[in-house]
Image (cartoon, rainbow, N blue to C red):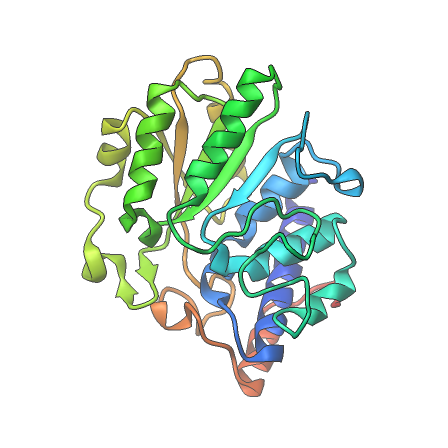
Amino acid sequence: MNLQELSSLSTQVRRDIVRMVHAVQSGHPGGSLGCTDLLVKLYFDTMNIDPESFDMDGVGEDLFFLSNGHISPVWYSVLARRGYFPVEELATFRKLNSRLQGHPATEEGLPGIRIASGSLGQGLSVALGAAQTKILNEDSAWVYSLHGDGELQEGQIWEAAMYAAHHRIDNILSFVDCNGQQIDGSTENVMSLGNLQAKWEAFGWRVLTANGHDFQDLDRVIVEAHGYRGSGVPCVVLMTTSMGQGVDFMEGTHEWHGIAPSDEQLERALNQLPSTLKDY
């Protein structure tokens, strides 16, 4: 897809997010809006995937793991618009008996979802297991994962980071959503993460940086990371984003981490997100 097509799709995904969360007055719009561009880039312009023949093993396909599972609205929208399930199903988000639970789960068999997530800190361990399996099976596909910066306060992340470096797992590309916000405030005030680049490097990872709202910069960093395959060093991208990106009154504040817009706020948000694509 070209830049205009990616941008248009991101706008539509953002419309989906605010409408989904508003409809049930529940969910996490802030981080979902902030990570929209990355997921659109991965699913529509980077990953080797076949939505129509999805299975849990994903042999020969690139895999994606969403560790910060509370931003499920953006993932559901991208999966639906990529063809994993009908776009109309987005209207069932967080409703009784829906396959689109508040946090992604596997028991309903929703295509595109391979692990239950949202219990923070666990996703990197699972992604590394999948990546190591591909290495052992001589599968050349990639594994991608996404994590919140506040999630890095979880100790399991760093256990997994040690494991990856020790086992030279270099077919994984992990992204950290560095928006500086978490549910109770800024990461700096809740528990400072310090120098994340120095931390990851100390754990044996190659650290790259990118603007999470710039498709060209995301493309650059993905291409660079792919070039390090075979080095035996895992790669992480510290991706700068703005929580609530695209909706001015949601941007840059933790207050929209997990609350839903009112009717008036939804109208304001949608007016800022004009799209030529079709709403669900």
The reply, left or right, for residue 213 in relation to residue 167 is right
Residue at position x 46%, y 46% from top? 212
Image height check: is 100 above or below 22? above
Q: How many marks?
A: 0
User: Who's the residue at 62% across and 31% down the image?
Assistant: 62
Nearer-the-camera pick, 154 or 217: 154
Is residue 61 at least partly visible in the picture?
yes
Say which quarter of the image contains residue 96: bottom right
- In this rendering, does residue 217 appear at all? no
Question: Residue drawn 71% across and 49% down?
Answer: 111
Which quadrant would residue 100 be assigned to in this image?
Answer: bottom right
- Which image quarter holds the N terminus? top right
Left or right, 55 with reference to 30: right
Left or right: where does residue 210 sit relative to residue 219? left
Q: Residue at x 68, y 57 (%)?
A: 108
Position of residue 23 in the picture relative to residue 51 (left or right): left
Give coordinates of residue 21: x percent, y percent.
Answer: 57, 73
Q: Position of residue 175 (x, y in %)?
A: 44, 40
Horizontal and vertical percent position of residue 36: 55, 54
32 lies above or below 91: above
Vertical side of 233 occupied by 270: above or below: below
Question: What percent of the width, then of the height, locates residue 171?
Answer: 50, 23
Q: Quadrant of the C terminus?
A: bottom right
Q: Quadrant of residue 184?
A: bottom left
Using the image, determine if residue 137 lies above or below residue 277. Answer: above
